[in-house]
Image: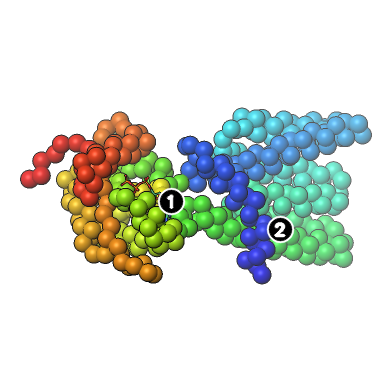
Amino acid sequence: MLDYILSRITSPFVRYVRRKLAMPNNSADTLLQSFRNKVTRNMVWAGAITELLLAGAQLWLGNYMQSAIIFTAGVVFAAIAYTFRHGRIPNYWRLVFMVLLSVICVMSIRENGTIGVYWSYPLLVASFFMFRDGYAIALAAAITVFFSIAALAYMPLNDGWRIAATLSVILALGSVFVVMLGRMQKLLHQLVVTDTLTGLQNRHRVNSVLSDLINNFRRYHRAASLIMLDLDHFKLINDKYGHLFGDQMLKQLGRRLKLSLRVNDQLFRVGGEEFLIVLPETDIKEAVKVAEKIRQIVSNAPFDGKDAQVRLTVSVGVAQLRAEQTWAEWINTADTALLEAKRKGRDQVCAAEHYSAE
Ligand SMILES: Nc1nc2c(ncn2[C@@H]2O[C@H](COP(=O)(O)OP(=O)(O)OP(=O)(O)O)[C@@H](O)[C@H]2O)c(=O)[nH]1
């Protein structure tokens, strides 16, 4: 039941993510991060507009001092939201946002008496949006404790404990919400980066994995290589045995590849019958050895389908990361080597550059 409700809530977002991911340069990580940033920025805009409206109301009531302070806070919120309109609002600005809201809350208690405690409710809710996971819960707990103590100390007991109890209920519900949101985000992330047929990673994480290796290379000169492989004449298999049989072959190939790799190597299914292997700490010489081993693992033993056994072969391109290459150029180099292997007759390994086999 919970799974059903979660899937109903998340499916429009999953569709949005999938649509966006179809565009070039959108990796799953950057997309989820940008979605979160957008929500936070909208919160700060909402805070700015509310504060400016309140400042207007205080001005109209003739409370010039309060109006000026609330107006200043509104302008600060608007400036934060505007400055970071395309990116992530840094944590210290989020903290400034929360501190300003707290100050306004405390001022309201001072000016209006205990009725001002009611401002602690939106403050509490804001903390769940502004921070992540444990930080949000810790901040919300601190706000709850602070305003509960204030309410119990300065309000009649009957009102004071009700305020404390309702704040605690919001804290509990908000904490459940934050934990569920964290799990949902993990689930969505998993969905977006996983190839549903083989269970391997799909192309959406390639960008960030390769960028990390490129940074390592630039900083510590750590070698890294790519293996791009593609099944030979796979169309013939599909045409002869059907698409479902073809799917079984792809799954088995994924399993074979996975078993043949080291723990640090990463395997992706990047296209229909195209797979990418990322080999950290590996130069071209070692990478070609791995590629040759993989080629043999595929061609040496037949693949078992429901109705038949078939022999498959792969063409393989290998490329070591070169200085100043971007991740896209690096992949292109491996792809060119793969095309070369196809051109030379398939079932073979081609390296993107000359190297000594000694
Ligand atoms: N069963 C199945 N087939 C797929 C999937 N994705 C792509 N294909 C098929 O893979 C085949 C790829 O065909 P081609 O690009 O002509 O390549 P090929 O037949 O392997 O020939 P070469 O790559 O030149 O050796 C097409 O028939 C696609 O329909 C999939 O998820 N499942």
Q: Is residue 190 visible?
A: yes
Residue at point 27% right, 60% down?
A: 311
The relative height of residue 302 versus residue 323 in the rendered view (above or below) is below
Q: Which amino acid, by three-letter code, is at mark 2?
A: Thr
Quadrant the C terminus occupies? top left
Residue 10 position, x and y percent, is 63, 55
- Give left or right: position of 86 versus 246: right
Of residue 46 and residue 202, the one placed in the foreground of this image is 202
Q: Secondary structure at mark 1?
A: strand
Task: Tell me, for residue 202, which label it has, or none.
Answer: 1
Quadrant the N terminus occupies? bottom right
Q: Nearer the viewer, mark 1 or mark 2?
A: 1
Q: Secondary structure at mark 2?
A: helix
What's the distance in space between the residues labelled 1 and 2, CA to CA?
A: 43 Å
Residue 39 position, x and y percent, is 65, 43
> Dot 1, crowdedness within 10 Å: few (<14), some or many (≥20)?
many
Of residue 179 and residue 112, the one placed in the foreground of this image is 179
Q: Which residue is mark 2?
A: 144
Q: Is mark 2 within 8 Å of ligand 1?
A: no
Task: Tell me, for residue 165, which label it has, or none.
Answer: none
Q: Residue furthest right?
A: 61
Q: Residue furthest left?
A: 358
> Dot 2, crowdedness within 10 Å: few (<14), some or many (≥20)?
many
Report which quarter residue 92 is drawn in. top right
Residue at point 79% right, 38% down?
A: 50
